[in-house]
Image: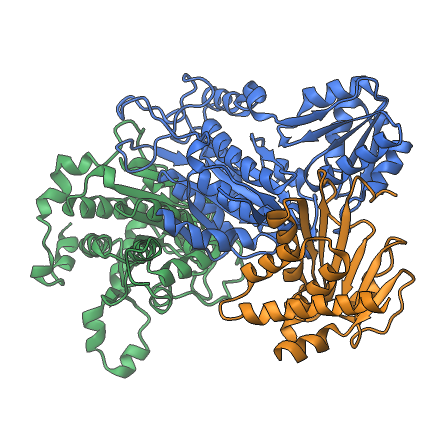
Amino acid sequence: MAVSLMQGNEAIGWGALAAGCRFFAGYPITPSTEIAEMLSRELPKVGGTFIQMEDEIASMAAIIGASVGGLKAMTATSGPGFSLMQENLGYAAMTEVPCVIVNVQRLGPSTGRATAGSQGDVMQARWGTHGDHPIIAISPTSVRQSFDLTIKAFNLSEQYRTPVILLTEAIIGHMREPVDLPEFETLEVVERVVTSSPDEYVPFSNEMGDVPPLAGFGQGYRYHITGLFHDQMGFPTQRLDEINPWLERVNNKLNNHLDEIVMVEEDIQEDATVAIVAYGASARSARHALKVARSQGHRASMLTLLTIWPFPEVQVEKLGERVERVIVPEMNLGQLALEVERMVGRRKVVRVNRADGEMVTPQMILDAIEG
Amino acid sequence: MISSLADRIEISLVGKGGQGMILAGMILAEAASIYDHKNTVQTQTYGPEARGGASKSEVVISSGEIDHPEVINADILVALSQEACDKYSPGMKEDSLSILDEENIDCTPATPFVRVPITRLALETTGRVITANTVALGVLVGLTEVVSRQSIEKAVLARAPRGTRQLNRSALLKGFEAAEALKMHT
Amino acid sequence: MAEHILDAHELDVDEIRIPRENWFESSETLQKLRKNKKFPTIWCAGCGNGIVMGSLIRAIEHLGLSNDEVALVSGIGCAGRMPVYMDFNTLHTNHGRALAFATGLKIARPDMKVIAIMGDGDALAIGGNHFIHAARRNIGITSIVINNAIYGMTGGQYSPTTPIGKQATTAPYGNIEPSFPLCELAIAAGATYVARSTVYHVLELDKYIEAAIRKDGFSLVEAVSYCHTTYGRLNKFGTAPEMMRDLKKNSISKAAYEKLSAKRQAGNSKIVRGVLHVNDEREEFTKLCRKLTEQAQGGGRQ
């Protein structure tokens, strides 16, 4: 294509189109609205449908319904809307229906600061809906990565039959950077494939590896989908010998494929005594601070987490073994730091936080590096 | 200084909501990235108001990779309103330059500044106050050459709504002219 | 049975187009049920839900629809459990959200007949917003609301259609909230086919559900039912057969209602049964979506 100056939110829209998204349902909310506006313009051009629903609950429901109908589907929202989506998000996890939820985080709680960025929904992305469930959340650090990770979100969602949350914020979402998007045809896109005949089809099979294939409605595969605990055919069950195998398969289906799901960027100095673990907009501030620190003679490493959930336990643990201190800058009061602490020990972790809607500054991180 | 990485240049364009400073930032960023082929990041800060309130557009330009996307200590400030000037002029680099709209602003920053009657020039040249942002871009580029004149002109014209290309072009040229006059003067 | 047939005779003979012997004896009807699902149903003996399920099956069969082209979507509550027994594409969703899920499904598969089955709490309380907006869009979904005036599954709490003064487990002093008139709400919101009958008047239900499915846009059939287990017991309405008889006694056909004087109409407290509203003017939503797509792709008017 050609270089254009593009907003992160717009890149998410293009990423969705490139991944084959053909349905978007959403409700207007700052700072995510550009995604809806962009897709309301572009989706019809490729034969897709945009619909503005009556609220975020309905938006989440509609994308699950459309996905069951065979379309790749996405919604985009911010904190208050993300809160409303939680029940249906759990439904998608329970029924293993692929869908992508973009949360352009803004400062909360409540209405908070609608136009200010935040990383306050990190824990909500993991545990926002009730009950134990698998979830994938990924977080871009640039406009180009907003495009790439949206495609990745769709691919992971289809591959593992799970909702995937693209966790960005007002900073990256509203930021403009020059990008030269690749031709869509050249990109790797995961499509649904059902191998068994309708007569043999077992929609929630525990015997076909971790992820049984999903057949869309109206294609001859008649079956039942329910948010109740269900047997392999999808029928409600109270039998513990049916519930437990389901729990085991579904909660392990991501853990068994971490090498494909967990994405990090490593910038390691062998003799570093300090390391930064960062994600999203804060990774941008951290990288700046890292360069300044190194130019001043500090030895420091950095791990940028593109995958937030499942948490990159192995990578963080390994990093922790090599340094004395791990700095975790976040635009919240310390959320993912809890996970880092779990992996490297509390005493090694230096939290750098602000939760007023402004970016963590490179100076704050530099101060932490200098100790 | 923490913001002085490589050849990083930080520019803040501030005004009231509706004065077009966010659009000016986008145009400047397009001139730098698309036409001058430099790494560029543009960000913005705005309140809940669509009109009024302080609004800020930031552009960071560098030949190296830009990590932190926001202005840390601005090299250049363009301010069209008093409130925006009060809010954003502290924190400028010592050797920075502030370009202040003469008739709208009477604060005196501690760092180097020039006063240009940006809004009046816009009104005199095009008859439209709304072109003040384009005049401001002309002054900014004319004084600092942060992007080339050809590139800013291409970027302005590419963004100009149908039927306003000539209007915007004359506003931009007026800005260049004002910058030349200032240079002669100093 | 005798009473049942007698009541059916109140209908125009022409309107009864389904040969009656097919309803009860046809094995094709039974084939709409799931062979691999264990019966009996979750419902209490004497519940009206099974009657509505029977009507729905007969309507689908009479329309000649294949099982593959039908999707049943439901929410939570006793009514929400209906789809699991039937051999269609079935989606049992969250409380109140059936229509929102169905909206996405209908857009993805406009060729399918999407039918949403809800209860009164499901459709009018937690799902009230989705209900009015689905009607406003006139999306091609057939809504069947089984109105038993109570939250049955959770044990008898008052719902948006519990009459004033009636007992519920959360209205021990009698309900003080007025009820939501479901059909009138749907009409005001933009539904293009609205009919009401009761689980006593099975022939009407068959016919109305069939017409509702045939209708292109958003259609509603309110099936007035009862819950003898909770509502009936709390209010001393007796057994299921007694409550069933009350539906006959306390309802009136639209034709008979329209013959009443204005004064008696105003004083009417009976359930009015009939096709309450038909609008053939409004275009169905997914058809509008298709047009918009063609326009965006340059095929239609600019």
Residue at 73% x, 53% y: name it: B146
Q: Would you say B47 lies left or right of C12 here?
A: right
Which color scheme is applied?
by chain
Q: Would you say A282 lies left or right of C289 here?
A: right
Q: Quadrant of residue C91?
A: top left
The shade of chain A is blue
State the quadrant of the C terminus of chain C: bottom left
Q: Can residue C102 be seen at all in this image of the molecule?
A: no
Expressed as whole percent of the image width and height from the top left, the position of residue B7 reads 78, 43
Residue at 9% x, 44% y: name it: C21
- For the residue pair C10 and C278, the one nearer the viewer reads as C278
Q: Would you say A31 lies left or right of A181 here?
A: right
Residue farthest to the front?
B184
Residue at 38% x, 38% y: name it: A68
Q: Is residue A84 above or below residue A146?
A: below
Q: Is residue A314 above or below residue B69?
A: above
Expressed as whole percent of the image width and height from the top left, the position of residue B19 reads 67, 69
Residue at 24% x, 47% y: name it: C56
The shade of chain C is green
Q: Is residue A80 above or below residue C34?
A: below
The shade of chain B is orange
Expressed as whole percent of the image width and height from the top left, the position of residue B2 reads 85, 42
- For the residue pair C112 and A365, the one nearer the viewer reads as A365
Expressed as whole percent of the image width and height from the top left, the position of residue C117 reads 34, 48
- For the residue pair A185 and B96, the one nearer the viewer reads as B96
Q: Can residue C116 be seen at all in this image of the molecule?
A: yes
